[in-house]
Amino acid sequence: MSHSTAVAPLLQLRGVSVSFDGFWALKDLDLALLPGELRAVIGPNGAGKTTFLDVITGKVRPTRGDVLFRGRSLVGIPEHRIARLGIGRKFQTPRVIENLTVGHNLDLAVKGSHGPLTLLFGRLSAQQRQRVQELLAVVGLERHVAQQAGSLSHGQKQWLEIAMLLAQDPELLLVDEPVAGLSDEETELTGKLLRSLAGDHTVLVIEHDMDFIRELQAPVTVLHEGHVLCEGSMDVVQNDPRVIEVYLGTETEGEFQS
Amino acid sequence: MADLVSSRHLRRSLPWLLIVIAALVLPVLLPPFRLNLLGRFLSLGIVALGIDLIWGFTGLLSLGQGIFFALGGYALGMHLQLSALAPGELPEFFGLYGVKALPAFWQPFTSPLFTLLCIWVLPALVAGVLGYLVFRNRIKGVYFSILTQAALLVFFNFFNGQQKLINGTNGLKTDTARLFGELVGSDSMQRNLFWLTVLLVVGAYLLSRWLTRGRFGDALIAIRDDEPRLRFTGYNTTVYKTLVFAVAGAMAGVSGALYTVQSGIVSPQYMAVPFSIEMVIWVAVGGRGTLIGAVLGAVLINYAKSLVSEALPETWLFIQGGLFLLVVTALPDGLVGWWRRGGPGRLASMLGWPPRTATYPQLDLDPAVQAERSELEGGMK
């Protein structure tokens, strides 16, 4: 946060287009995130939400356009370096290393050098170990620290992955469907956690669950066929005729999920 | 409870203990021919350890470890060809092809020190370069396996064709060479080589264990299970894969050199396609990701192979194929994995003996309890 002034956006997408063999997953997408902002991104299936994250995190190279992070272009930088610049990503389905324990998952993710020599010869600093303990407490997995991640429940895996994301201490958190498959109670806690992160971090949440988005009380960006359809508060967005036309037809589906 | 702990301890250390006892007692018990065989098979355990590192832990199935194995063998073979020569003399085979001067790349192999380095550094370098090019381009899975096999074939054909440089198909003999004034093929030298092999197997095992314990090993497992996840966490996975592939290459080189001096010859046959596939089978049968299983697999299968081949030469390939099928279908974790996950107990109960239980039998046999217990055990690994 100290690196950016209050007005300059932390993340900016300028005219980003992505073509997969002639199919345009993203079309001329413009989007800016201010430091400390919490933003929700919604859109029907196939709107390009995941490709949008892939472009930011370096998995997919934009066919046209530019992605700027703190004013610096991310295009062409490999994924691991983008991650080290301070962009963390949580995947749609929980992606934890199932054959490692909960604690070891976090030990791998915790901020610090990720070079092979450090991992071979270095030890976790007291600070890093403390951070892991804190995060275990945040997501309520202290008792499971020695348990294999693969044996956790779905919700616990989601939270472990969020904890891994936090362990990286990224400036920008990209969170893809954090509450898919969670119970109501877990969903509420996840919402609280994400809201508490905003301010210190910039958080972008992709979700299908409309109730969850409303709970976040965050500005909403609606994606449709690869570009931004409209932006605004949940109430504004819901009353926008374009959104009603392209999106609310599937909102019933969204309500089934919640 | 104490019983449980000690039996778990025993289960963990038993295979290891067996190898140590065998190494101590066998030189006394076995005739030189059998001891020599065992030494050769143990040296194969080192290449198997390397395969366990890259395949069992990192998920890279290489079918081309024969390249690095043969490179180590050739490095030592060349040195031994030169070691007994008077100044100005050439190794005998050069005469057959009318070669009058020692090819330039043979020169440094007169130095024992250079040779000792070359045995593991050269294969490590070749593996590192090959690995880097492949991993940088994100080639993985079955494509990686095919590529390594293709590379193996390239090396195999190249070495076969170079009569004037390295005696082509015939390979280089080492038996009649002298090391420290003693014939390499002699019984006492072979016994020393057996000890050296045991020492290096232990060294390679300890190195592998050090690499796979701690966060580095966790990173390898993470690459195997979900490489993109690790990349998005800020890890340059290409570096890790290149590194571990180079280590496995170095181990293959050491293994090849030890195998060469105990077999009396190094030839392009070490780069034959079936041999490199067999190496993978040893690891699969012994147990992927168990380290000790790789060594056990290499020794047991090769011993079985030599015993079966002596009695019924035609049947070995069928038995080997059957073993592989058995492991793939019934023992996916290999022998050691099966052992560690309570396989013997399950087998006993299948045969009608009740398994030994820690609490009430009914409670112990409850599937839910068993599932929970195996989860807990997994977690403590």
Image (cartoon, helix red, strand yellow):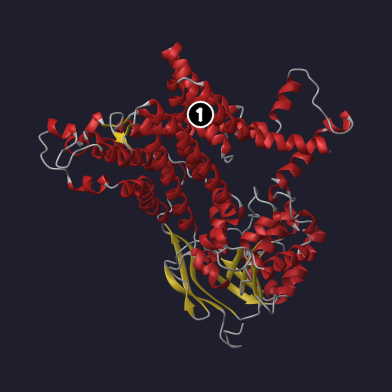
Amino acid type of the residue that numbered disc 1 sits on in the rendered structure = Val
Quarter of the image where the C terminus of chain A is located: bottom right
Residue A53 location, quadrant = bottom right
Residue B150 screen position, x and y as percent:
34, 39
**Image quarter of the N terminus of chain A:** bottom right
Q: Residue furthest front?
A: B181
**Residue B179 visible (yes or no):** yes
The x, y position of residue B95, in whole percent, is 13, 32
Q: Secondary structure at mark 1?
A: helix
- Reply above or below: B278 against A174: above
Task: In the rendered view, tell whether residue B245 sits above or below residue B265.
Answer: below
Q: Residue A198 lies in what quarter of the image?
A: bottom right
Question: Which residue is at 72% across, 38% downward?
Answer: B9
Q: Residue most toward the top?
A: B311
- Horizontal relation, residue B212 to residue A154: left or right: left
Task: Please tell me which residue lies in front, B235 or A9.
Answer: B235
Coordinates of residue A153 in the picture (x, y in percent): 75, 50
**Residue at image mark 1:** B299
